[in-house]
Image: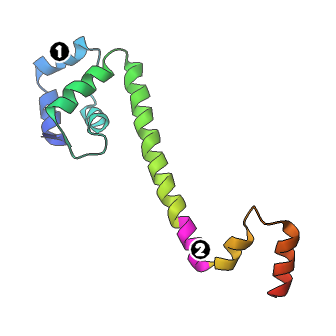
Amino acid sequence: KLSEEEFGSILENPQVQVWLNVLELEASDGRHLFRLLAKGQKFVSVDEFMNGVKKLRGHSRSLDVISTQTDVLALQAQTQEILVSLRVLLQTQFPLSTRALSPSEPSHCKAARKEAHG
């Protein structure tokens, strides 16, 4: 397995740069390429490197699309974590309020409950 630092050193090798150029990939942004191939991990195996480079082969747009997909997946995960934390916070801080905001409860029931509780 390769760390990001080791990966960067390999990309400095002129033969590797030629190989990547033949595949129409830029070696200039090694950190970005590593992050795409590592998929959130701290290391990239040789197989992940080879399969990832083959996947990225072609136009630079492929790299942009895969980069965008990776970013979107990371944002989705972060958004989900925030949503779960927010639900927990609301349920612990405002147990009646969150129930009162339930979309399935008719508005006249909400008003009656509000009057009953003050």
Q: How crowded is the residue under tag 1: few (<14 C-alpha within 10 Å), some, or many (20+)?
A: some
Residue type of the residue flagged with mark 1: Val
Q: Is residue 110 above or below residue 48?
A: below
Note whether residue 27 is visible: no
Residue 8 vs residue 23, the one in the foreground:
23
Does the magenta-highlighted stretch encompass residue 65? Answer: no
Q: Is residue 38 above or below residue 104?
A: above
Viewed as shown, does residue 69 lie left or right of 112? left
Q: Residue at x 55, y 66 (%)?
A: 86
Q: Which quadrant holds the C terminus? A: bottom right
Tell me where residue 47 appears, x and y as whole percent. 17, 30
**Quarter assignment of residue 52:** top left
Which span is picked out in magenta?
86-93
Residue 18 is labelled as 1
Main SS class of the magenta portion in the image: helix
Note whether residue 77 is visible: yes
Q: Disc 2 marks which residue?
A: 91
Distance CA(mark 1)–CA(mark 2) = 57 Å
SS under mark 2 = helix
**Quarter assignment of residue 5:** top left
Q: Residue at x 12, y 38 (%)?
A: 6
Viewed as shown, does residue 46 lie left or right of 68? left
Tell me where residue 100 appears, x and y as whole percent. 74, 72
